[in-house]
Image (tube, rainbow, N blue to C red):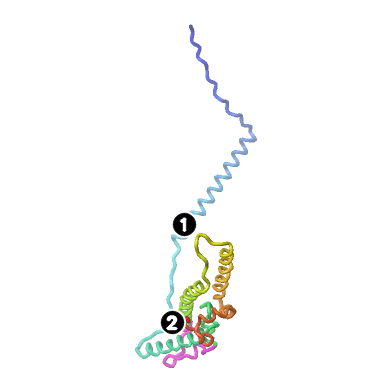
Amino acid sequence: MVNKVAKMSLPKKPRLYAAQLKKDAEKAKRLLILSGYYVDCWFVTKLESVLRIETTVINPVIECSDRDTIDALINTLYTVRADTYNVLGSAQFWNGSWFGTQNIVAAHSGKPETRLVNGKPLPSKIFEWTVQDTAKNILASQEASKVEIIKRIYKRIPLHVGADLTKQQVALNKELTKQRQAAIDALKSFETIKTIPWLLTCFDTNLTARWQVPRFK
């Protein structure tokens, strides 16, 4: 018997027309151009980051050549901090912002040019830094006080707990949760705090004259 070997036929490649070949060639050309632009931009960006030289120029705000000048400067800054507490330590500054606080203090207690250090006016930049630093301390104290106030809010408005709550208790919890959130939201400003009388009692009565760390009753 003669063994017959069956020949396997390979799939024929689709014939591409001249128009399709030209279209594919133009597409490949555009891709090459775009990739070239990307590489160029990437290289230029990296080159700029390497060649960029950043310099910091430090200009002296004030020069202290003797002990008397230093002592006079410290005493003046003590006064600036005290004035800042007197102006920004009031209830009106509750939950405020330290940006531009130097203008508020200057309007109430005098501009930096009126504060003399050994006969020379206090530099405005030192005045600004001192006021803003003091304002940040005041705001930090306020944030610490808010934590204690929120604890009082949760203690005053307790929720029903347990696995087997009745429908009435679940509904009451929803209402009490709204009251809690309303009291917490009221801490955004002293005006909103005054709308909740029992929340106002958490503060010292002297708060309306000057803000201090709240003393809880």
* Foreground: disc 2 or disc 1: 2
Residue range in magenta is 108-129
Give coordinates of residue 169: x percent, y percent: 56, 65
Answer whether residue 185 is magenta in the image. no
The type of residue carrying mark 1 is: Lys
Q: Nearer the viewer, residue 63 or 40?
A: 63
- Indicate left or right for 57 with 20 as reference: left
User: Which residue reaches farthest left?
Assistant: 67
Looking at the rendered structure, which numbered label has been put on residue 38?
none
Where 16 sits versus 66, above or below?
above
Give coordinates of residue 57: x percent, y percent: 43, 74
The type of residue carrying mark 2 is: Val
Mark 2 crowdedness (10 Å alpha carbons): few <14, some 14-19, many ≥20:
few
Write down the residue under mark 1. 46
Q: Nearer the viewer, residue 166 or 99?
A: 166
Q: Quadrant of residue 78?
A: bottom left
Where 7 sits versus 151, above or below?
above
Which residue is pictured at 60% across the width and 29% down the height?
A: 14
Write down the residue under mark 2. 61
Q: Quadrant of residue 108?
A: bottom right
User: Which residue reaches farthest top?
Assistant: 1
Q: Nearer the viewer, residue 201 or 207?
A: 201
Which residue is pictured at 47% across the width and 60% down the height?
A: 48
Disc 2 on helix, strand or loop?
A: loop
